[in-house]
């Protein structure tokens, strides 16, 4: 998808007027945890909340399961940035502002509907060490790609991170600000580390929108089954698969 330059302020006003009427609303069903500890080698039924199950994209390294369970705003397709959870995006003429128009009707594996507030919650978690959803992860992928976290400055007093914040335009539109241009910003954002996670599942890392959903774990092998409500109906898999959890 080609990104076209535009008069940013005018475009933002048009988007706000046309889309501000979209109502905000989302399901808030929390993912329940397992009530008892399984014996060694037993299968853990879905949903899983074990602290040993590392499926948080922001901190899970190269776990094979991540690409099957989660998606970001954009993805790489044949080496080129393409839409994913954002069905379209535009960039301001100065390269500092990115508008992402979210794909309507996307649901997480627990039925929660994707919206702008969820996207903002993910960016805040990645960027802000004081965010209540932060947990104990190092978020090294964020620091490595975008320079640093909120409040960190260089010896010259400038912000370390090129990222400067995110705003909600309406329920299906977000505006991301940079303080320094980065022509690779979208490519970096396509990394699995920046997949959008359901805030109900930040702590257990099991809340994606991908074509597969987690069903069970035995030792280090997870079973993933097709997600029947996947937004891309042409890409819903036909069979379950097994992948290694590292």
Image: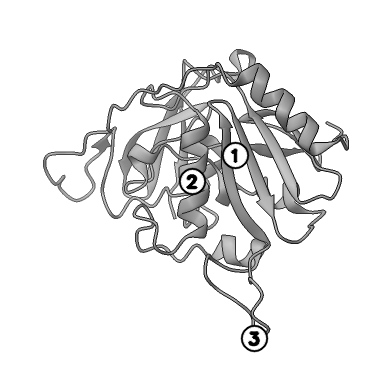
How packed is label 2: few (under 14 Cα within 10 Å), some, or many (20 or more)?
many
Q: Where is residue 120 in the image (x, y as percent from the top left)?
A: 51, 42
Residue 234, quarter of the rendered image: top right
Is residue 165 positioned above or below 140 on the image?
Answer: above
* Distance between the alpha carbons at the discs numbered 1 and 3: 33 Å
Q: Where is residue 159 in the image (x, y as percent from the top left)?
A: 63, 71
What residue is shown at x 80% (from left), y 38% (from top)? 8
Give the image location of residue 33, x and y in percent. Answer: 21, 38
Residue 124 x/y as whole percent: 48, 51
* Image disc number at residue 122: 2
Instruction: Name the foreground residue: 53 vs 93.
Output: 93
Q: Distance between the residues labelled 1 and 2?
A: 10 Å
Q: Residue 155 carries which label?
A: 3
Asked whether disc 1 touches disc 3, contact meaning CB atoms under 8 Å apart, the reply is: no
- Which residue is rendered at x = 71% and y = 60% of the image? 179
Identify the mark nearer the N-term, 1 or 3.
Answer: 1
Question: To which quarter of the image does residue 47 belong?
Answer: top left
Q: Residue beneath label 1, please? A: 72
Any part of residue 65 in sight:
no
The quarter of the rendered structure image containing the C terminus is bottom left
Q: Distance between the residues labelled 2 and 3?
A: 28 Å
Residue 137, above or below 63: below
């Amino acid at each position: 998808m080609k990104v076209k330059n535009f008069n940013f302020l005018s475009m933002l006003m048009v988007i706000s007027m046309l889309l501000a009427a979209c109502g905000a609303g989302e399901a808030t069903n929390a993912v329940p945890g397992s009530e008892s500890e399984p014996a060694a080698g037993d299968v853990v039924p879905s949903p899983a909340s074990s602290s040993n199950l590392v499926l948080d994209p922001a901190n899970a390294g190269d776990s094979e399961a991540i690409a099957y369970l989660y998606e970001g705003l954009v993805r790489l397709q044949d080496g080129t940035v393409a839409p994913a959870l954002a069905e379209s995006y535009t960039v301001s003429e100065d390269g500092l502002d990115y508008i992402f128009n979210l794909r309507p009707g996307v649901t997480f594996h627990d039925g929660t509907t994707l919206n702008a507030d969820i996207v903002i919650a993910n960016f805040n978690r990645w960027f802000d060490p004081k965010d209540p959803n932060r947990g104990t992860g190092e978020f090294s992928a964020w620091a490595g790609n975008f320079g640093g976290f909120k409040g960190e400055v260089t010896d010259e007093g400038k912000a370390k991170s090129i990222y400067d914040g995110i705003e909600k335009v309406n329920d299906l539109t977000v505006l991301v600000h940079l303080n320094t241009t980065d022509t690779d910003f979208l490519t970096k954002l396509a990394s699995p580390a920046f997949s959008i996670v359901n805030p109900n599942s930040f702590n257990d890392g099991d809340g994606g929108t991908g074509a597969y959903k987690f069903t069970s774990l035995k030792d280090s092998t997870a079973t993933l089954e097709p997600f029947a409500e996947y937004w891309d109906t042409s890409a819903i898999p036909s069979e379950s698969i097994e992948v290694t959890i590292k």
